[in-house]
Image: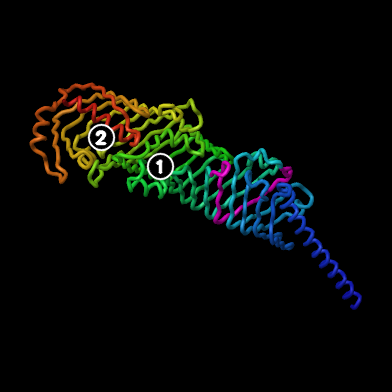
Amino acid sequence: MRKFLKVFIIISVVIAAVFVAGHFYVKNRLHSTIENDLLTGQVAVEDLNLNLWTGDASATRIRTADSIAEALYFNIDKAAISGLDYFKLLTTDTIQVDKFEAEGYALNLGKDSSKQQSKSSQKVIVINEIALDKGEISNTSGARETAFFKFSKTSIKKVNIPLENILEGLEYQVDQITVDSLFLKLNKRENLHASRLNLYQDSVAVRNLQFVTNDSVQKLVRAGRINYDILDLQVPELTVSNYTLGLMSPSKFTADRIILNQPVLTSWSNANLEKGEPAATYHQLLRDMKLKLDIRKLQINNGTVDYSEPHAELDRRGSITFDQINGSINSFTNFQEQQPIKIDMSSRFMKESTVNVDWTMNVYDPVDTHLIKTDLHNFSLSSMNSFLNPVLNIELHGKVEDYFFTIDARKDNGIVNTQINYSDLKIDFLSEDGDSKWLLSGAANLIAKKNSNDKSINKDATMPRDRRRSIFNFIWKIQEKALRKVIL
């Protein structure tokens, strides 16, 4: 019995010694792999803890060294792994774990990582699941931030990352990424939000997407300090097929098709501001975006657009509404200079008539041209009064059978060709408090042509473009000029 007990104690001591030695060996090997093998001495880690029995490990403040901070920087406050495969760690070039968890992380993808002299590892990281919480990703060009992401509660499934030449390009294979509460800074004026994003190998599904002008710009616009259209695009459901996403500078996103279900776009203009710099054109906004886009087809199902403008002097606004919008935007891109964006839409106008729009623009056109061809049919002029009354102190009544116009709008000027068939026109000029100016209205109705006599009247008009105002402001004002020629 004593001999057995003695042998048992010796074996236990040996096992304990081997376990302790193995613990320290594996811990040191893991520490060395992180700090020396991943990016050859350019990753630091503090307070590494290891559970040899379960294959779990945790660490605090995992970060890159200053020498590659301009190319690739990351900092993780807390991290833990479970299910570490010791055999592959010790005998192969593969680091395989079941799950990686991180909290409080930041990743910065720099301007020109290829210039960094780093001997990249030949190892491959294989992770079945990654769980991230409270993190952000940025992309900088020198000291200037070009793209900025914030995430909350991110789940990534089946990740394979080859570390060879990682600084020359972030390559990865991922089966699925799920993100709750996404934020993306698109440019200095607009941000992107989403409540949930599901990203698969060949498709993306997004819930409650919002493209919005940021708060600081909105305050300046509403205070009359700058000229800009406040934009708020809300999309309950968006799907993407056959996409590619590149995070390294320049950031880019390409896709064969994006479908927007029930999008609602609100555009709030301070179009009567008399001072200030010219407003940025939509061409310029797309050119200035740091995220480069190339989308072959963007399909819109049952959308809504609401555009509002203020009165020149009074504190009131008029609005124009398009709903039941269906159609597509083809070649939506901001980095292929020779490829124009083509918009083909149909919708309901002011809740009653049908409108068809064929709109073409080239982002890199030096004069920022919009070519807009539109036709409307069977609508009452009184449907326009929700815009005309607050903005122009005027109301119209009558019937329009057919209305066609083509606008060639450029950065500084434009021309419109208008064809209209109408009947029973009546004009009512209003005072600021809404009362009819009967004398002026009576004179106008004596002069104006009440009918087009069942045929279309064709008129052209040209007008300089006030660059402090949006393209939508220019569209209705140049049409107003042409319609004056029609009825007088």
Mark 2 falls on what kind of element?
strand
Q: Residue at x 30, y 41 (%)?
A: 273
Q: Nearer the viewer, residue 402 or 191?
A: 191
Q: Residue at x 34, y 43 (%)?
A: 266
Q: Is-magenta flag for residue 143? A: yes
Q: Is-magenta flag for residue 483? A: no
Q: Nearer the viewer, residue 198 or 280?
A: 280
Q: What residue did someone put label 2 on?
A: 353
Q: Nearer the viewer, residue 442 or 87?
A: 442
Viewport quadrant of the N terminus:
bottom right
Q: Is residue 432 left or right of residue 96?
A: left
Q: Is residue 170 left or right of residue 439?
A: right
The image quadrant of residue 229 is top left
Q: What residue did someone put label 1 on?
A: 261
Mark 2 residue crowding within 10 angstroms, few (<14) / some (14–19) / many (20+): some
Which region is colored magenta?
118-144
Outermost residue on the bottom side: it is: 2
Q: Give the image location of residue 244, x and y in percent.
A: 55, 38
Mark 1 falls on what kind of element?
strand
Q: Give the image location of residue 378, x and y in percent.
A: 22, 31
**Residue type beneath disc 2:** Ser
Q: CA distance from mark 1 to mark 2?
A: 22 Å
**Residue type beneath disc 1:** Asn
Outermost residue on the front side: it is: 275
